[in-house]
């Protein structure tokens, strides 16, 4: 009896699955325009367009049908394909230029095709000028202590003694924490610059776009000598403040002792 019931359940599940998962493939089309920074078209750029071929985009092993097209004299390509979800991604590249990624396109199904039909997307390709070697240091560290100014040496990449091996103060971090419980707290981080002419400013560098995400040159003005980030929460409420884990947010700062402008 159990075997019979199990067989019936399997048969029912298979039939239901077959009925609820029809072929969702539909037609989609888009036009991509590639431009120089000055607005003139980029001829001969290779544009790769990928049409999602998996019913559930997030499922493991999802597949794409990719096309490679070359822009014409007007810097334009028209890509047509079939997709099961309306999710389309695209990128452009050309010798002498940084690779550029387009923002993922999400179309909606309407009958046998996805709309809007043939949307126009623009991409700015930034030329590679005269790249020079640069040096970067990744530091993964926490705040050694709260409610006291902590001095940091950019050249050494460490806190100034006695918290670390640093010798010259470039930046001062002051973290204040009032924690009433795990989900009830006030946190403030103040980043300040003690040396004249030093400062910080925030700029947006979208993840989708050129591999050269930051401006070619650090700004010559508009820096602030203090930057404050806050995180606050009350028990039973959502966190609030100006702190944000934003992949598009980047920071430029200038430190005279380093004799160079830096962007992170």
Image (spheres, rainbow, N blue to C red):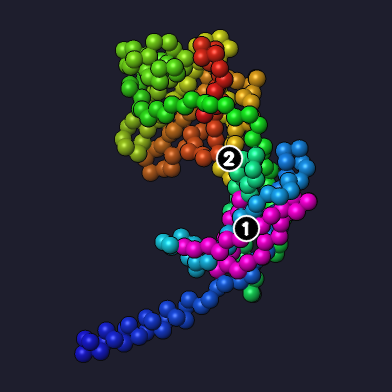
- Gap in angstroms between the C-alphas marked 1 and 2: 19 Å
Query: Dot 1, crowdedness within 10 Å: few (<14), some or many (≥20)?
Result: some
Q: What element carries label 2?
A: loop
Q: Which of marks 1 and 2 is nearer the N terminus?
A: 1
Residue 208 relative to residue 193: left or right: right
Res. 84 image quadrant: bottom right
Q: Does the stretch in magenta take in 75? A: yes
Residue 196 position within the rendered picture, expressed as x and y whole percent measured from the top left = 56, 9
Identify the residue under disc 2.
Answer: 211
Along the line of sight, which residue is nearer the eye, 36 or 8?
36
Residue 77 position within the rendered picture, expressed as x and y whole percent measured from the top left = 71, 57
Residue 122 relative to residue 87: left or right: right
Q: What element carries label 1?
A: strand
Q: Can residue 7 be seen in this view?
A: yes
Q: Would you place residue 122 above or below residue 260 in this image? A: below
Q: Would you place residue 54 above or below residue 247 in this image? A: below
Q: Which residue is drawn at 43% across and 20% down?
A: 173
Q: Which residue lies furthest to the front in this view?
A: 95
Disc number for residue 98: none
Q: Which residue is drawn at 41% across and 37% down?
A: 233
Identify the residue under disc 1.
Answer: 68
Res. 125 image quadrant: top right
Residue 169 relative to residue 9: left or right: right
Q: Residue at x 74, y 48 (%)?
A: 43
Q: Give the range drawn in magenta.
A: 62-91
């Amino acid at each position: 009896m159990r075997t019979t019931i199990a067989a019936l359940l399997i048969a029912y599940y298979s039939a239901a699955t077959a009925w609820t998962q029809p072929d969702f493939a539909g037609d989609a089309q888009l036009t991509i325009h590639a431009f120089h920074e000055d607005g003139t078209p980029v001829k001969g750029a290779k544009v790769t367009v990928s049409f999602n071929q998996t019913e559930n985009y997030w499922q493991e092993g999802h597949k794409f049908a990719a096309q490679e097209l070359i822009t014409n004299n007007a810097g334009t390509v028209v890509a047509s394909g079939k997709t099961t979800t309306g999710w389309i991604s695209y990128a452009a590249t050309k010798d002498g230029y940084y690779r550029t990624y387009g923002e993922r396109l999400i179309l909606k199904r309407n009958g046998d095709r996805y709309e809007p039909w043939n949307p126009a997307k623009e991409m700015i390709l930034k030329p590679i000028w005269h790249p020079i070697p640069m040096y970067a240091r990744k530091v993964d560290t926490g705040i050694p202590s709260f409610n006291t100014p902590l001095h940091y040496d950019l050249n050494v990449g460490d806190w100034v003694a006695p918290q670390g091996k640093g010798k010259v103060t470039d930046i001062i971090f002051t973290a204040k924490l009032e924690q009433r419980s795990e989900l009830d707290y006030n946190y403030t981080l103040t980043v300040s610059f003690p040396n004249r002419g030093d400062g910080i400013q925030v700029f947006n560098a979208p993840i989708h776009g050129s591999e050269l995400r930051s401006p070619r040159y650090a700004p010559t003005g508009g820096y602030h000598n203090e930057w404050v980030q806050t995180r606050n929460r009350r028990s039973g409420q959502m966190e609030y403040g100006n702190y944000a884990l934003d992949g598009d947010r980047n920071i430029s700062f200038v430190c005279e002792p380093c004799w160079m402008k830096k962007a992170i």
